Image: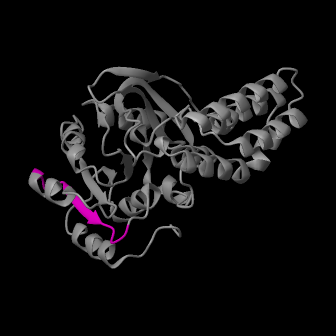
Amino acid sequence: MSRLTDDPGIVAAQQCLRRAPAPLVSVVIPSYNRGHALGACIASVLGQTLEDFEIVVVDDASTDDTRERVAAIGDARIRYVAHERNRGGAAARNTGVRVARGDFIAFLDSDDSWAPRKLERQIALLGERGPEYGFAYTWFIGRDRDGGEVSRSDHSLDGSVADALLVANHVGTFSSIVVRRDVFECVGGLDEDLRSCQDWDLSIRLSRVTKICCVEDYLVSYFHNGADKHRISSNPASLIQGHRRMLDKFADDYARLPRDRAAQALRGYLDVFAGAGSFEDVLRLGRRMLATTRHPGSALQCGVALARAAKRRMTGRFGY
């Protein structure tokens, strides 16, 4: 995995981990200053009905008590690795995979949690589907800080679905993903230059080399917290950078999509740029939509997006 770093601490951790038999699943949990949330997150993994796993917590140079909270849990299946400097979620996940020993990799964000049968059902489904399927995900429920439901994601994809994933991020969150390690390594890991859209980018690249399946059940609780400054979705600059890079990175793929699907994809980008208050990107993408989709409603959509971007800029309240 050429993009994964060679860090002396990681090498030492690998040597230590090799002393024990390899688990079936490695659960990679990146965390940055979320020590307060890690207990519940890790507890949801320790409560899995599939018990053949290890947990790799990657502390991305936190300044809180993350190390102490992980150590206090006292379970031998938990490994702790720390970055010396903050490098972002993609680098932290790549580090976790580098240290991991499992045949399957599962990701879990440090403030999310799983239902007890999450891993069991995904591994079982991948086993049923056979070696052509190297990636499984689940539906998830978005929750607020009080545990109340605020959203649901129930998109179902199966098979060779690269074009569908180009149109929209139907997988939706790292916390729902289980992927065969060899497939993850085949695509070179996560793109550490992306400040957002990291899960979407990974899903697209994985879909080019393997088939995808979905456990059609709500097995992940995804925490919505717009006040959390460490959440990418709360950072307009990160959203803009990530979506710009996605448009450039997959430009050829978008160009070959049927016109209606290309229009749907571009409308999604337009919505993000408007929500982030980026006039420049709304104007640039609006011209592209008018030139490529030739849909009579495109001009109206662009006008609405410009008005929305203006409102976001004036109020300073950004978001989808």
Answer whether residue 237 is magenta in the image: no
Residue that appears at 33% across and 60% down: 100
**Lateral position of residue 82 relative to residue 69, left or right:** right
- Residue at the far front: name it: 314
The number of discs equals: 0
- Residue at the far bottom: name it: 8
Q: Which residues are magenta?
A: 73-85
**Residue 160 visible in the picture:** no
**Residue 221 visible in the picture:** yes
User: Where is residue 195 shown, x and y percent of the image?
Assistant: 53, 54
Residue 46 position by quadrant: top left
Residue 12 position by quadrant: bottom left
Snapshot colouring: one colour
Q: Nearer the viewer, residue 225 or 294?
A: 225
Residue that appears at 90% across and 36% down: 291
User: Where is residue 266 shown, x and y percent of the image?
Assistant: 73, 35
User: Where is residue 183 shown, x and y percent of the image?
Assistant: 51, 53
Is 212 placed above or below 229 here?
Answer: above
Residue 102 position by quadrant: bottom left
User: Where is residue 320 shown, x and y percent of the image?
Assistant: 56, 31
**Lateral position of residue 24 relative to residue 311, left or right:** left
Q: Nearer the viewer, residue 215 or 168?
A: 168
Is 40 placed above or below 83 here?
Answer: above
**Lateral position of residue 20 relative to residue 141, left or right:** left
Residue that appears at 52% across and 67% down: 3
Is 3 placed above or below 136 here?
Answer: below
**Lateral position of residue 168 relative to residue 19, left or right:** right
